[in-house]
Amino acid sequence: MNNKGQALIEFILILPVLILILFGMIEIGNIVFQKYKLETHIDPIIELYEDEPELISTYESKNGFSSEFSKDGNLVTLTLSKDIRLITPGVTNFLGNPIHIEAERTFYIDE
């Protein structure tokens, strides 16, 4: 008996699932990378907040995110946020589109 045709049909049936898993891993990797990039922008924003707060909006627009400050006494909480648009059609059904990510840090300032 020749099983080549059966193996081909099984491969064709499982191929869309494998492609969906592959692109899902790529999209999740992109989300993690974008979150990491947000967290690396926290330190320069804190320095701008302490030295030149008027330059924060220029830095935000250049890097594509938004920042929000909330102050409680001498503690300031900085929240950076960004919306990420996914590109894989099947993955957007599971994860939603766009995905909102945030990075947050609280720091102390002397006044």
Image (cartoon, helix red, strand yellow):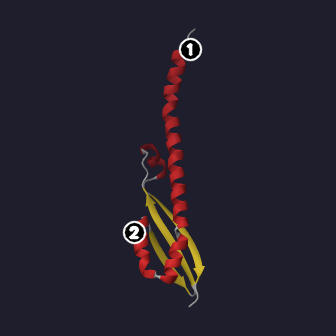
Location of residue 26 in the rendering, given as x and y in whole percent from the top left corner: 51, 46
Cβ atoms under marks 2 and 1 closer than 8 Å: no
Of callouts 2 and 1, the N-terminal one: 1
Residue at screen point 51% across, 55% down: 31
Residue 102 against residue 56 in the figure, above or below: above
Residue 103: percent from left, percent from top: 54, 67
When the figure is inspected, residue 95 is found, relative to residue 105, above or below; the finding is above
Residue 40, horizontal then vertical, whole percent: 55, 66
- Residue at numbered disc 1: 3
Q: Residue 42: x and y, percent?
A: 53, 71
Image point (42%, 44%), residue name: 89
Give how far apart the Cα atoms at labels 2 and 1 are: 59 Å
Q: Residue at x 44, y 43 (%)?
A: 90
Q: From the image, state whether disc 2 or disc 1 is nearer to you.
A: 2
Image quadrant where one finds the N terminus:
top right
Q: State the residue position of label 2.
A: 61
Q: Secondary structure at mark 2?
A: helix
Q: Against 8, is 14 above or below? A: below
What is the crowding at mark 1: few (fewer than 14 residues within 10 Å), some, or many (at least 20)?
A: few
Task: Tell me the kind of residue under disc 2.
Answer: Ser
Q: Residue extending furthest bottom?
A: 111
Label tally:
2
- Secondary structure beneath disc 1? loop
Q: Residue at x 43, y 65 (%)?
A: 63
106 sits left or right of 101 in the view: right
Residue closer to the observer: 54 or 68: 54
Front position in the image: 25 or 94: 25
